[in-house]
Amino acid sequence: MPKPIIAIVGRPNVGKSTIFNRIVGERVSIVEDIPGVTRDRIYSSGEWLNTDFNIIDTGGIDIGDEPFIEQIKHQAEIAIDEADVIIFLTNGRDGITGADEEVAKILYKSKKPVVLAVNKIDNPDMRELVYDFYALGFGEPFPISGTHGLGLGDLLDEAAKYFPKEGEEQYSDETIKFSLIGRPNVGKSSLVNALLGEERVIVSNIAGTTRDAIDTKFTKEDKEYVVIDTAGMRKKGKVYESTEKYSVLRALKAIERSDVVLVVLNAEEGIIEQDKRIAGYAHEAGKAVVIVVNKWDTVEKDEKTMKQFEQKIRDHFLFLDYAPIVFLSAKTKKRTHTLLPMINLASENHSLRAETSVINDVIMDAVAMNPTPTHNGNRLKIYYTTQVAVKPPTFVVFVNDPELMHFSYERFLENKLREAFGFEGTPIRIIARARK
């Protein structure tokens, strides 16, 4: 079940980014900065009432040189397309403005749930400013203060009422679900068609559990697969095509429902920042990853070309050092037969559970080889390690003081686990926890 999506919509200078940061900063366990991951402020995750959700800050959607009102319209339209519930943010100190009314007109037509929030109500004496906002026609306005963090709980309570109810997915545990992500024109659709055309055993096209997602189920050598695709953009035009961040939003939905994510690169154009941003979301979501270099047929090659390109990928995608790389051409179908075996391998390792006794042997051998670090005269002591989850494989290391577990030593332990068990294609998580 994909996470619900909240979008914050409103004219400029009402505090969208402040509210976004408040919700994200207070409700999210921030993933450590990993070298090579490019961050993007438009999207993040939150948690409320034991439910995880995604949140979009439309203030981060840059429409370029569009006129002022047109920018607001386009940002709202993108949010409407993607969101399950919309927070319409206004500024209580300014009252209702013409730009607020323009946003309201767009939201009336959306048929999406809208929760009206009046920001900058910093103390109880200002609550009377809220009453005018009933005139916008979205029911009760919620007074909030982004500066002081007031009223956000009531606001999220109301938004959570509109989260989609959980539904059952119709696939067995043995079915491998994979998606293809990447910027436009890297050949994702061509690659899907090459895979399906080669197999010619499509079972059915099933409407996915997310809006406008199409799941294509097929079988190869008695193994069942589902390709998760977003079925292309519903709207054409320069706004959508020129807004790189829009394609990121669409990729997020597919990532969440996948076991394995194929990060597709264009061999002709090389690697750009957007490739790293999109791949970073797959890594942070804990999904198995295979890097696919498409259009390999268009590159002039000698015996060193593939190794040089692979090294370039490793240099740019430092956080995906565990991901296998496949070179192929969807157009000519050369080397496409190598892709499914790599998907199988990544999926198996993503679900791999190791024996506790062997895990502890590996960790103790690693400590004997490279003693634990000290800090301020205190040495890290490792007592016991156990695997607590799969997808991705997650290990809890019981220690005397988690603060003594330096990132570099954690990385060393991860490498030793990979040497022992493989784990090619999947991230692994290590959590240091104090022994009680």
Image: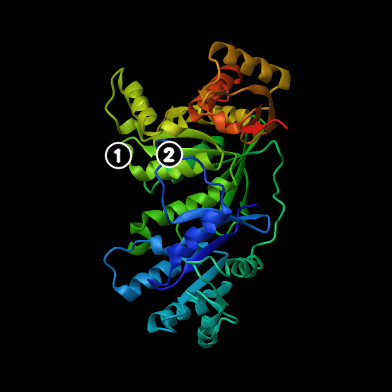
184 relative to 87, above or below: above
In the image, what residue type sits under mark 1? Glu
Q: Which mark is residue 269?
A: 1
Residue 249 visible in the picture: yes
Residue 137 position, x and y percent, is: 55, 85
Q: Secondary structure at mark 1?
A: loop
Residue at point 53%, 82% (across, down) = 125
In the picture, measured across the screen, residue 106 lies left or right of residue 378, that is left
On the image, which quarter does residue 220 sit in? top right
Q: CA distance from mark 1 to mark 2?
A: 12 Å
Nearest to the observer: residue 386 or residue 345:
386
Residue 335 position, x and y percent, is: 44, 27
229 relative to 240, above or below: above
Dot 2 alpha-carbon crowd within 10 angstroms: few under 14, some 14 to 19, many 20 or more: many
Dot 1 alpha-carbon crowd within 10 angstroms: few under 14, some 14 to 19, many 20 or more: few
Residue 165 position, x and y percent, is: 69, 61
Residue 269 position, x and y percent, is: 30, 39
On the image, which quarter does residue 414 sit in? top right
Scheme by which the image is coloured: rainbow
Sequence order check: which comes first, mark 1 or mark 2?
2
Residue at point 61%, 12% (across, down) = 365
Nearest to the observer: residue 27 or residue 161:
27
Q: Secondary structure at mark 2?
A: strand
- Residue, disc 2: 264
In the picture, measured across the screen, residue 384 lies left or right of residue 117, that is right
Residue 197 visible in the picture: no
